[in-house]
């Protein structure tokens, strides 16, 4: 799956989950123990805006901006739109400096898309709302995380792999690899 298709899949997953949220879900705990529902969505939006800015050659803002001030749906829509607009063929092919290293735009967009998909599941699980993901997208997300984050010796806040049965669904295999209990 190419980066822009992955970004569209992430948008579909996150938009679906956010559309089911109510204000009461804001403080709900997520499986990503460091963030509640609001913080997980903010993390993804901040990441998308950071990658979009890097692709466009912009310097990151010095002060934090509340991307969810107008609500999670608007915050996500704005972050997705910014990243989608910045993900031009030229920007995807070029090398950019990201907080996690110097990578092509294609890799950066793939990484943030995989991150958004996993955190959409976190938000759905924390809020107790439906989450649906096509098997091919789950397989792509798993393959992307396998390329980006080793199974052993994880650092930087990545949880250890949770073992799942060999016959587990693509979603459950992806969740287990990213340290979540399916």
Image (cartoon, rainbow, N blue to C red):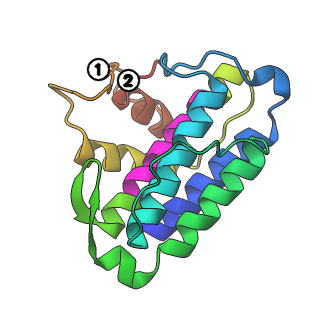
C-beta proximity under 8 Å, tags 2 and 1: yes
Q: Is residue 70 left or right of residue 57?
A: right
Q: Position of residue 61 (x, y in %)?
A: 47, 54
Image mark count: 2
Is residue 27 shown left or right of residue 20? left
Q: Give neighbour class at mark 1: few <14, some 14-19, many 20+ (Cα, 10 Å).
A: some
Q: Residue at x 70, y 42 (%)?
A: 68
Tell me what residue is drawn at x 61 percent, y 56 percent: 79
Q: From this viewpoint, is residue 177 visible?
A: yes
Q: Nearer the viewer, residue 147 or 38?
A: 38
The spot of residue 173 in percent (x, y) is: 40, 32
Q: Position of residue 182 (x, y in %)?
A: 50, 22
User: Which stretch did the figure color magenta?
Assistant: 110-122
Q: Which residue is mark 2?
A: 179
- Give 96 or 149, whichever is nearer the viewer: 96
Residue 157 among magenta residues: no
The residue beneath circle 1 is 160
């Amino acid at each position: 799956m190419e980066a822009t298709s992955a970004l569209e899949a992430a948008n579909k997953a996150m938009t679906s989950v956010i559309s089911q949220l109510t204000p009461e879900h804001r403080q709900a705990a997520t499986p990503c123990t460091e963030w509640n529902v609001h913080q997980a969505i903010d993390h993804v939006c901040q990441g998308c805006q950071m990658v979009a800015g890097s692709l466009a050659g912009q310097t990151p803002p010095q002060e934090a901006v509340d991307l969810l001030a107008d609500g999670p749906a608007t915050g996500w829509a704005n972050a997705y739109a910014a990243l989608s607009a910045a993900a031009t063929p030229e920007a995807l092919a070029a090398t950019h400096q990201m907080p996690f290293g110097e990578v092509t735009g294609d890799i950066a967009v793939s990484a943030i898309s995989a991150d958004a998909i996993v955190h959409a599941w976190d938000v759905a699980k924390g809020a107790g709302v439906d989450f649906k993901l096509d098997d091919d997208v789950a397989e792509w997300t798993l393959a992307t995380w396998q390329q980006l984050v080793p199974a052993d010796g994880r650092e930087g806040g990545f949880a250890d792999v949770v073992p799942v049965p060999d016959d587990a669904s693509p979603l459950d295999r992806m969740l287990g690899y990213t340290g979540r209990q399916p």
